[in-house]
Image (tube, helix red, strand yellow):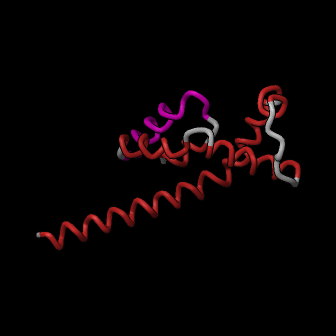
């Protein structure tokens, strides 16, 4: 849940949304907020913007300047949303599988130590 919502362009309200969803589904809030930090700028938002730009225009955004990132910020938020619709579930599944595998490894080590 943390990575899924952390990828979306919920500017200035990621943590609130994560806490509300985790409260509703009775999930671990600390783990969700911690995992959302994997999606902090600039890497994941930049990937989402690139993907959204590709969806809209059919080619990658290669010009990074004040014009493309500053003056066209509203278009970039729309592209961030478009890109995150594909990237958010993929990243969430990837991080979820990695977390599950790490938890299994720790569980096995605890069982062997006992």
* Left-right relation of 36 to 65: left
Residue at image position (55%, 48%) is 4
Q: Give the range drawn in magenta.
A: 10-27
Image-quadrant location for residue 74: top right
* Left-right relation of 22 to 75: left
Locate residue 73, reporting x and y percent: 77, 30
Provide the major secondary structure of the magenta segment: helix
Residue at image position (86%, 53%) is 59
Residue 20 on the magenta segment: yes
Residue 105 on the magenta segment: no
Residue at image position (19%, 66%) is 110
Up-down relation of residue 41 to residue 89 (above or below): above
- For the C terminus, which image quadrant? bottom left
Locate residue 97, reporting x and y percent: 46, 64
Image-quadrant location for residue 102: bottom left
Locate residue 80, reporting x and y percent: 71, 41
């Amino acid at each position: 849940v943390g990575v899924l919502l952390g990828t979306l362009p919920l500017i200035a309200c990621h943590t609130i949304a994560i806490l509300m969803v985790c409260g509703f589904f009775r999930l671990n809030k600390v783990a969700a907020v911690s995992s959302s930090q994997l999606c902090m700028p600039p890497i994941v938002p930049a990937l989402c913007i690139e993907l959204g730009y590709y969806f809209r225009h059919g080619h990658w955004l290669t010009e990074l300047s004040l014009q493309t990132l500053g003056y066209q910020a509203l278009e970039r938020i729309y592209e961030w949303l478009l890109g995150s619709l594909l990237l958010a579930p993929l990243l969430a599944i990837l991080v979820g599988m990695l977390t599950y595998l790490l938890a299994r490894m720790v569980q096995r080590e605890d069982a062997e130590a006992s």
